[in-house]
């Protein structure tokens, strides 16, 4: 398979709302994203580098930390209760329009936003489980999920993420994203991660130690 060019890479307890002065990135009128699992057709038309990042079963936090030579950080953008998107309710087994906790962050390497991540969970399941997402702050949720053996990860799905769901400064059509659900008892936590252009630049600039 041919090497991917930059153009190919970019196209193809009770919780209270934290006072982070931004709004969630959503557009209820936007058509639902066509999430898909790994298929032979997808593999045939997608550059190998993108597939490697999309379907990596390991911790994304740890991989970004290695790529950035330990210069990894998390910047919270939004945390709070809101009505979940239709595709999120479906993935979580919730009724359309259900309310949940939403956490949006940038995962950064060398200070640059490499990944936009959005994590959601239904209100009742989160309250009953007791997972305190509010206290995460600038810590990585992904690292918590991979360290807690009680969470079982479900299959990864991918899509080219709608620009309307991204922060304004990153709102570009065609960026690749992935999502997977982490289950612990009745709690279902859906984590979506969108790979931003700066990540692909970093993969060319820095040597990744696997």
Image (cartoon, rainbow, N blue to C red):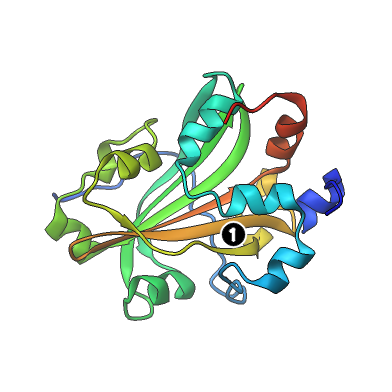
97, 155: nearer the viewer: 155
Name the quadrant containing residue 164.
Answer: bottom right
Q: Quadrant of the N terminus?
A: bottom right
Disc 1, SS: helix
Question: Which residue is drawn at the image coordinates 13% and 49% (left, top)?
Answer: 13
Name the quadrant containing residue 140.
Answer: top left
In this picture, residue 88 sits left or right of residue 37:
left
105, 148: nearer the viewer: 148
Farthest bottom residue? 95
How crowded pointer 1 is (Cα within 10 Å; few <14, some 14-19, many 20+) is rated as some
The residue beneath circle 1 is 165
Name the quadrant containing residue 128.
Answer: bottom left
Q: x%, y% of residue 182?
A: 34, 57
95 shown above or below 135: below
152 shown above or below 19: below
Residue 167 in sight? no
Question: Which residue is drawn at the image coordinates 79% and 56% (left, top)?
Answer: 11
Question: Which residue is drawn at the image coordinates 77% and 59% (left, top)?
Answer: 12
Q: x%, y% of residue 10?
A: 77, 50
187 shown above or below 107: below
Q: x%, y% of residue 53?
A: 61, 47
Residue 39 in sight? yes
Q: x%, y% of residue 49?
A: 72, 47
């Amino acid at each position: 398979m041919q090497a991917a060019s930059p153009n190919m890479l970019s196209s193809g307890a009770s919780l209270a709302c934290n006072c982070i002065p931004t709004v969630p990135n959503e557009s209820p009128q936007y058509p639902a994203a066509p999430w898909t699992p790994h298929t032979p057709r997808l593999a045939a038309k997608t550059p190998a580098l993108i597939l490697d990042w999309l379907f990596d079963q390991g911790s994304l936090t740890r991989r970004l930390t290695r790529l950035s030579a330990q210069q990894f950080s998390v910047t919270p953008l939004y945390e709070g209760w809101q009505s979940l998107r239709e595709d999120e309710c479906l993935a979580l087994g919730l009724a359309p329009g259900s309310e949940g906790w939403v956490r949006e962050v940038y995962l950064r390497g060398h200070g640059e936003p490499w990944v936009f991540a959005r994590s959601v969970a239904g209100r009742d399941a989160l309250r009953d489980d007791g997972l305190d997402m509010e206290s995460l702050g600038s810590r990585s949720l992904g690292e918590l999920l991979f360290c807690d053996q009680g969470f079982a990860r479900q299959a990864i799905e991918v899509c080219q993420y709608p620009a309307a769901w991204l922060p304004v400064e990153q709102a570009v059509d065609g960026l690749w994203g992935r999502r997977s659900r982490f289950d612990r008892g009745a709690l279902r936590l859906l984590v979506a991660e969108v790979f931003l252009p700066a990540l692909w630049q970093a993969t060319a600039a820095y040597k990744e130690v696997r």
